[in-house]
Image (spheres, rainbow, N blue to C red):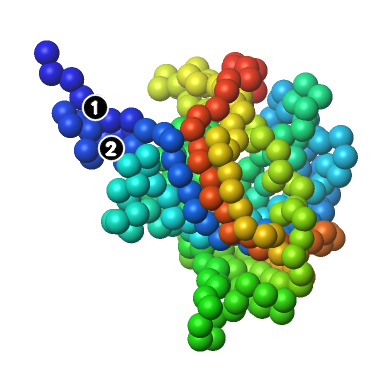
Amino acid sequence: MSSVRGFFPPKTATGRAALVPPPPWHYSGDLLTIEYRTDPARVAALLPPPLEPADTDPGAVALIWADWQSCSQSREELLDPVRAQYKECFAVVRCAYRGRTFSRGVYIWVDKDFAIARGIHQGYPKKLGSIHLTRPHPYGPAPRIEAGARFGATLAAADRRLAEAVVTLREPAGSNGFVNAHPMAHHRWLPSIEPGKGLALDELVSSGAASFEGGTPWAADAELRLLDAPTEELADLRVDELIGAYYRQVGVCWNGGALLESGTSGAQ
């Protein structure tokens, strides 16, 4: 009897056409992180049960731009860069689950279909967007990784600009911020094929890096502007107070997560 293969659709006899290969997935990237405070009620409104606002600084948000190269265990995508390179912008908040603090991506935009497919598996709410950020380089006019270097970053989706930022490096730092410094708590949701039957898949999962390495974080000064759009709600997480900004180069491996509980979110 014939069978079809592939970690993710489309499944075929060989599995070669699958949109993404099985984990582990490896990432090398440049991150620009801007942390700020918004109204805690606006963060709480994005947390489905059983998640609750973080005990401390519940209105803290991190908006992160990332320029990634990613690959499977074979590393073959690095030699076919169209399959490896993508950019991402994501808004992260913190939440509490049974007394433990987690980070949670509440909005995420990427510019490649394979990144969306990985997000479906992981529980990240990824959408297509247009993401750009200044790349460092040791020669010519591009900024070096040094005090005074300036980086720009923009996010757009559906032809509307959603965010724009300018980050100026100040000095080496001890960390890359605190909002995105916890294991992630995400929901894997899939509506039932039968109308009115709610969710066929409703899982609260936790995941994080299977391994991590990173360069020296740089603290920075930042300017950040969020813009309204008819089909996006990022601007509702308005910037009330800037906390800080950071630049860092990192390498990460993701290799699955853990089920925390299922069937309790009440999401539709």
What residue type is disc 1 on?
Arg
Report which residue position mark 2 lands on.
18
When asked about the image quadrant of residue 218, the answer is bottom right
Task: Specify the quadrant that holds the N terminus.
Answer: top left
| Residue 141 rendering spot, x and y as whole percentages | 54, 86
| Residue 128 rendering spot, x and y as whole percentages | 46, 53
- Helix, strand or loop under label 1: loop
In the image as oriented, which residue stretches furthest toward the right? 56
Report which residue position mark 1 lands on.
5
Rendered residue at 59%/48% (across/down): 213
Q: Is residue 258 visible?
A: yes
In the image as oriented, which residue stretches furthest toward the top? 1
Q: Is tag 2's residue or tag 1's residue first in the polypeptide sequence?
A: 1
Task: Specify the quadrant that holds the C terminus.
Answer: top right
What residue type is disc 2 on?
Ala
**Image height of 141 relative to 247, above or below:** below
Rendered residue at 77%/38% (across/down): 44
| Residue 175 rendering spot, x and y as whole percentages | 74, 53
Distance from Cα at disc 2 to Cα at disc 1: 8 Å
Q: Badges 2 and 1: C-beta atoms under 8 Å apart?
A: yes
| Residue 222 rendering spot, x and y as whole percentages | 74, 69
Near mark 2 (Cα within 10 A), the count class, few <14, some 14-19 or many ≥20, is: some
When asked about the image quadrant of residue 5, the answer is top left
- Of residues 257 and 115, the one nearer the viewer is 257
Rendered residue at 37%/33% (across/down): 22
- Helix, strand or loop under label 2: loop
Is residue 243 left or right of 10 when viewed as pictured?
right
